[in-house]
């Protein structure tokens, strides 16, 4: 029996490694397409302001491609690793546990796709509009500032915002798991609300890039998710009582 599980674990590890290598290879083949997809949310800014990307080192473009395909490969590696771990542990779960964890996995996957959509549709364009407004507001002054963005710095910005956005949405999963076990003690949760707020900002300090904007964004998003989850649980409890 142990030999069977060890063999299955080795096979799944091999599949995960092959998936990671395959995704990296395909990503390198379509590296220009990937760069375009990351720049696409801000094409309007480049068209309106005649912006362009520069590189100041001979290896910058190659380093950008390597960082990008490594980033894409790691995202697929994480998803497939979680999937294979879940499938590997499924035989040892009760049916109600399987349904609960499968629902959480599907919800997490949906939130992951939704976070990417929100990032590309709203967060990136709004952030560029905000920061480029400082450039356009002083064009007629004695000092003129003009952006010449480095492509590798843009990729770094996108990756940082991606992790911040995904982290915010995945916090819903943690809150759902947490509140599902304390439905009977919601009053104590409300009493300890200030400590939860402090904990959210503390976690944001450790998990986000070292800038105040990212920390405040993650902290406020976590608080909003926390309050929304509490309201959802309360409404669900009232609905069950009414039925």
Image (cartoon, helix red, strand yellow):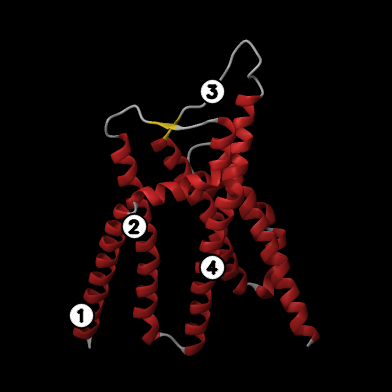
Marks 2 & 4, CB-CB < 8 Å contact: no
Q: Which residue is mark 4?
A: 110
Query: As drawn, which residue projects farthest toward the top?
Result: 142
Mark 2 or mark 1, whichever is nearer to me: 2
Determine whether the residue tagged by mark 1 lies in a helix, strand or loop.
helix
Residue drawn at 48 percent across, 37 percent down: 210
Q: CA distance from mark 2 to mark 4?
A: 19 Å
Mark 3 or mark 2, whichever is nearer to me: 3
Q: CA distance from mark 4 to mark 1?
A: 31 Å
Q: Earlier in the sequence, mark 4 or mark 1?
A: 1
Q: Which residue is mark 2?
A: 73
Pointer 4: residues within 10 angstroms few (<14), some, or many (20+)? few
| Quarter holding residue 142 | top right
Label disc, if present, on residue 146 of the rendered structure: 3
Q: Answer with left or right where residue 124 lies relative to residue 62.
A: right
Q: Earlier in the sequence, mark 3 or mark 4?
A: 4
Percent from the top left, x then y, of residue 104? 52, 73
Pointer 1: residues within 10 angstroms few (<14), some, or many (20+)? few
Q: Earlier in the sequence, mark 3 or mark 1?
A: 1
Q: Which residue is mark 1?
A: 7
From this viewpoint, is residue 218 visible?
yes
Q: Earlier in the sequence, mark 2 or mark 4?
A: 2
């Amino acid at each position: 029996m142990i030999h069977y599980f060890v063999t299955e674990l080795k096979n799944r590890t091999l599949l995960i490694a092959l998936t990671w290598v395959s995704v990296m290879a395909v990503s390198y083949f379509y590296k220009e397409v990937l760069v375009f997809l990351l720049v696409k949310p801000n094409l309007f800014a480049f068209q309106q302001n005649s912006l362009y990307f520069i590189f100041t080192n001979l290896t910058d473009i190659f380093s950008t491609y390597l960082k990008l395909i490594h980033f894409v490969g790691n995202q697929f590696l994480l998803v497939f690793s979680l999937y294979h771990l879940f499938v590997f542990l499924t035989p040892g779960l009760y049916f109600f546990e399987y349904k609960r964890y499968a629902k959480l996995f599907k919800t997490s996957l949906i939130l992951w796709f939704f976070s990417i959509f929100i990032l590309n549709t709203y967060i990136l364009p709004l952030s560029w509009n905000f920061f480029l407004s400082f450039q356009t507001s002083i064009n007629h002054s004695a000092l003129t500032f003009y952006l010449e963005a480095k492509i590798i710095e843009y990729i770094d910005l996108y990756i940082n915002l991606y992790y911040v956005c995904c982290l915010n949405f995945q916090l819903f999963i943690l809150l759902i798991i947490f509140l599902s076990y304390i439905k009977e003690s919601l009053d104590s949760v409300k009493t300890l609300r200030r400590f939860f707020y402090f904990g959210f900002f503390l976690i944001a300090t450790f998990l986000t890039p070292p800038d105040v904007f990212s920390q405040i964004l993650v902290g406020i998003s976590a608080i909003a998710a926390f309050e929304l989850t509490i309201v959802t649980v309360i409404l669900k409890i009232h609905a069950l009582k009414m039925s």
